[in-house]
């Protein structure tokens, strides 16, 4: 009997490939980074070949660990950076251009023109999303208008377009399956989330031909099977697919209405399960599909808010300023000072996301004095990561009209104990960190396992999930108000600064 599930977690800065056994234990995980491309200020690209290469390296590295034979892999689960868009040749599978990454702001002017034409309300009503270059639709349009030879390829029916999950499935199946799941499709601004189908009005508005897009399928169930993948036998079902944040919500066992998680990755994202109800935000948050468990099931919806720069701010300290040698160094450096010392860092390095939605905003570092040192900048960076989430959480609570349950946390930076304590303090809420903080991987595996019947229901998965540590707020309310006031002053300066 097959014993393992292979997970592909294709992220913004690298690809993780992991192996989970059918008892829900993560047995191995490897990660391979790939280059980020910044052609102009505010533009971010990836080479699709780099993404595919990193995934293939990951699969090879996992198999070399010899924890299982390739034939013992019962299913593959995929989770991915969501809004990143790309186009490729249907016959060869070769990319036609670089992928435009979710962080990229190149379509800001176009989105503003749609807003001025009065289209924002329609887009919000049908998709649950705000009108912003963050989402895939305007990226697809840019690619279709700025890729050499695209008109001829479109006329010949050779163009395929999609998000990263679709690109991976295409290659894993030898070009046999052009498919995406509902959670990824819900991030494109091209799907009516009430019907879970591509919407012709939106396709026309963004000038994207529907026939180049993938078929929309449930998040759990067989979406295709391997064919011609080095190291893997043909016929392994790809049985679970979800965008990274939805996969993390599933991996955190947030199956009940009102349960929520915060993932600390390149960006940080708070997502709450709202069940069968599409909660439309009045606070600048997003309504999205969390998952769909099989063809006959109804979609589960979620409310989400995200900050574009979280772990990426630490990478900037490392790569841009050189004040730390590795991301792990930031906790020890920040602990050298008792607090931020008046320094405020608003990490709007690629604009600001929820609840502000200011794509033209740029980062600011204020409150510097002769006494400011590297440790103050490091502490201000951790504070900023937590304070952005506090803004999102309070907006979410205003939409819901009630306080959240304890927040489950995950992602690489969730291992930073100082950051987790700061987060609990500025939120005034309890945080719960699971034993397995790679919850995107867990979610992809759980969805795949459900898709082939290893587990019969989410209830079985809830018993697998276990907490590792809780963080409770120790900050006095007066100190919290003072800290938030300082942050809000810096935030206003950032939003009002000339761009």
Image (cartoon, helix red, strand yellow):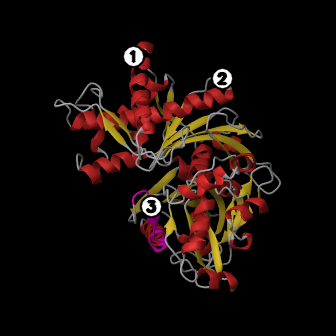
Q: Which residue is mark 2?
A: 402
Q: Using a 10 Å C-alpha cutoff, classify the residue at mark 3 as few (fewer than 14 neighbours), some (14 to 19) or many (20 or more).
A: many
Stretch in magenta: 41-52
- What is the C-alpha distance between the residues marked 3 and 1? 38 Å
- Which residue corresponds to the image point at 47% horizontal and 35% vertical from the top-left? 388
Q: Identify the mark at residue 44; answer none if there is no mark.
A: 3
Task: Pinpoint residue 449: horizontal percent, then vertical percent.
Answer: 66, 55
Q: Is 442 situated left or right of 54 in this image?
A: right
Q: Residue furthest left?
A: 370
What secondary structure is found at the residue carrying circle 2? loop
What secondary structure is found at the residue carrying circle 1? helix
Q: Is 343 situated left or right of 27 in this image?
A: left
Q: Using a 10 Å C-alpha cutoff, classify the residue at mark 2 as few (fewer than 14 neighbours), some (14 to 19) or many (20 or more).
A: few
Q: Is 31 situated left or right of 228 in this image?
A: left
Foreground pick, 351 / 167: 351
Rendered-image quadrant of the N terminus: bottom right
Foreground pick, 210 / 452: 210
- Which residue corresponds to the image point at 63% horizontal and 51% vertical from the top-left? 446
Going from N to C along the chain, the mark reached first, 2 or 1, is 2
Task: Pinpoint residue 205: horizontal percent, then vertical percent.
Answer: 71, 61
């Amino acid at each position: 009997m097959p014993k393992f599930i292979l997970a592909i977690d294709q992220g913004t800065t690298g690809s993780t490939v992991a192996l989970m056994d059918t008892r829900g234990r993560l047995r191995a995980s490897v990660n391979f980074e790939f280059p980020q491309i910044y052609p102009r200020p505010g533009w971010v690209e990836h080479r699709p070949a780099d993404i595919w290469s990193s995934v293939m390296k990951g699969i090879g590295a996992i198999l070399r660990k010899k924890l299982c034979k390739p034939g013992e892999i019962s299913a593959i689960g995929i989770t991915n950076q969501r809004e990143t868009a790309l186009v490729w040749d249907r016959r060869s599978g070769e990319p036609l251009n670089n992928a435009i990454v979710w962080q990229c702001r190149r379509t800001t002017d176009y989105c503003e023109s749609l807003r001025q034409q009065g289209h924002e309300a329609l887009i919000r009503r049908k998709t649950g999303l705000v009108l912003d270059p963050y989402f895939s639709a305007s990226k697809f349009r840019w690619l279709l208008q700025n890729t050499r030879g695209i008109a001829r390829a479109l006329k010949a029916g050779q163009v395929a377009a999609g998000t990263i999950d679709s690109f991976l499935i295409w290659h894993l199946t030898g070009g046999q399956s052009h498919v995406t799941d509902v959670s990824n499709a819900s991030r494109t601004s091209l799907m009516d989330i009430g019907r879970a189908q591509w919407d012709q009005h939106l396709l026309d508005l963004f000038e994207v031909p529907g026939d180049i897009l993938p078929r929309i399928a449930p998040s759990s169930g067989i979406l295709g099977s391997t064919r011609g993948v080095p190291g893997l036998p043909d016929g392994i079902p790809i049985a679970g697919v979800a965008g990274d944040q939805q996969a993390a919500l599933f991996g955190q066992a947030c199956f009940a209405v009102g349960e929520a998680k915060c993932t600390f990755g390149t960006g940080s994202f708070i997502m709450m399960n709202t069940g069968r109800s599409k909660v439309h935000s009045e606070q600048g948050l997003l309504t999205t599909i969390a998952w769909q468990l099989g063809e006959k099931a109804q979609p589960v919806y979620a409310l989400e808010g995200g900050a574009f720069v979280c772990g990426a701010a630490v990478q900037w300290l490392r790569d841009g300023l050189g004040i730390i040698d590795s991301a792990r160094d930031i906790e020890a450096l920040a602990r050298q000072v008792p607090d931020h010392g008046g320094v405020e860092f608003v990490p709007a390095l690629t604009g600001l996301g929820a609840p502000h939605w200011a794509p033209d905003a740029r980062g600011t570092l204020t409150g510097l004095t002769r006494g400011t040192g590297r440790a103050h900048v490091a502490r201000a960076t951790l504070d900023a990561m937590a304070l952005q989430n506090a803004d999102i959480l309070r907006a979410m609570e205003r939409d819901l009209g009630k306080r959240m349950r304890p927040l489950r946390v995950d992602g690489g930076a969730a291992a930073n104990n100082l950051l987790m304590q700061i987060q609990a303090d500025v939120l005034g809420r309890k945080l719960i960190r699971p034993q397995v903080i790679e919850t995107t991987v867990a979610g992809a595996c759980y969805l795949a396992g459900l898709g082939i019947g290893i587990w019969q229901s989410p209830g079985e998965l809830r018993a697998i999930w276990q907490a590792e540590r809780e963080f409770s707020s120790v900050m006095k309310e007066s100190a919290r108000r003072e800290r938030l006031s300082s942050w809000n002053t810096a935030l206003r300066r950032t939003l009002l600064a000339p761009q």
